[in-house]
Amino acid sequence: MTRPRNDNFLRALLKEPTDHTPVWLMRQAGRYLPEYCETRKRAGSFLNLCKSPAMACEVTLQPLARYDLDAAILFSDILTVPDAMGLGLYFAEGEGPKFERPLNEEWAIRDLTAPDPFDHLRYVMDGVSEIRRALDNSVPLIGFTGSPWTLACYMVEGGSSDDYRKVKTMMYDRPDLMHRILSVTTDAVVAYLNAQIDSGAQAVMIFDSWGGALSAAAYQEFSLAYMKKIVAGLKKEKDGEKIPSIVFTKGGGLWIESIADTGCTGIGLDWTIDIGEARRRVGDRVALQGNLDPNVLFASPETVAVEAKKVLDSYGPGNTGHVFNLGHGISQFTPPDRVTALVDTVHAYSRELRKKSA
């Protein structure tokens, strides 16, 4: 397999020289784009959009048509895996994702099995293949999953949660049941990501959105240990090209040394940690991705440029090892022109920095 014509994203993760700092955004295909909203309306529902390979491909490509981004990310949802495990995913208007059959009975937890991704999640794999064809080797395609802990939170709570009361009660009172959920979900996620790689994903990312809600000890036992198993189980190469992996724990800045120990290629950082400090702490062991506060994008384009430069300056000298991103997903209320200011600044200023250090 030949690398994409713009392979800066892959090169940065693999610590190969880049001519500029690559940039992509979490949730870059989303509601802040009018064209996305039009496609979503045509689809009739968010789930219909996710489950139509043609429409998922269409919205994946929309931000790349508008911005000079260095990677595409599969348009899907982290909850496709528990949905395929039989929990019955649905979206309540104004309330976000919910499950018809959350895991609150011991028998249901004991009966939990990992789905076959090429059977129960075929629509995702078809989407990955279609997006790869449509990208025509222009930029890399990122596949992704939720972390076992984050998925388990939704599976036990039955939806989003402010206090994680149900899932943490189970974790402390019945750790055996919690580990059962996490173990089966880990098997499911490994199979799911490897199927995405087989279908054309050129890098993969694990979103541990709720890992930061755990205590230090609980994070190690109930989140990180399972992400380490996932990284170990991933296909590391496809058609002679390395497949990098990124682990992102929201609120995980305290634990980046441990995250680096998972064997991942890159660590995603939220905006609460200084990226230069993170680089000093992990050294050359991993690449770093991040980490502009998404709310900066509500400020003026001039301010966006100033704040983007601060992140690049903080990362420090060198021509690799940094993928620029936000510290979390882009808000649906973001003015689209602010993303133009961000992407153009990251590219221009990172080239300038490389010239200075040459």
Image (spheres, rainbow, N blue to C red):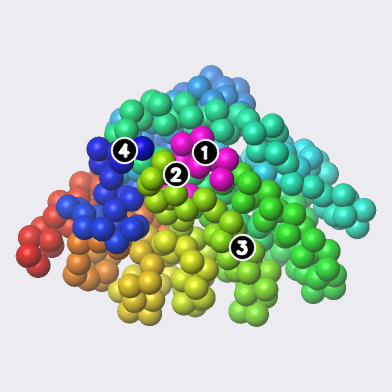
Stretch in magenta: 194-204
* Residues at marks 4 and 3, CA–CA distance in whole angstroms: 29 Å
Residue 281 in picture, x, y percent from top left:
38, 80
What mark, if any, has residue 229 been given in the picture?
3
Q: Is residue 35 above or below residue 256?
A: above
**Residue drawn at (10%, 58%), measured in percent from left and top?**
352
Which quarter of the figure has residue 215? bottom right
* The magenta stretch spans residue 178: no
Count up the numbered dots.
Answer: 4
Give amino acid for label 3: Lys
Q: What residue is disc 2 on?
A: 238
Q: Amino acid at mark 4?
A: Thr
Badges 1 and 2: C-beta atoms under 8 Å apart? yes
The answer to whether the residues at label 1 and label 4 have Cβ atoms under 8 Å apart is no
Going by the picture, which residue comes out furthest to the right?
A: 107
Q: Residues within 10 Å of mark 4 (few under 14, many from 20)?
A: few
In the rendered structure, which amino acid carries the disc numbered 2? Lys
Q: Are marks 2 and 3 in contact (CB under 8 Å)?
A: no
The CA span between labels 1 and 4 is 15 Å
The CA distance from mark 1 to mark 3 is: 19 Å
The residue that label 4 is drawn on is 2
Crowd band around label 3 with a 10 angstrom C-alpha radius: few (<14), some (14–19), many (20+): some
Q: Residue at the spot x=46%, y=57% of the render?
A: 246
The residue that label 1 is drawn on is 198
Identify which amino acid the numbered label 1 is placed on.
Asp
Label 4, secondary structure: give it. loop
* Residue 179 against residue 216 in the figure, above or below: above
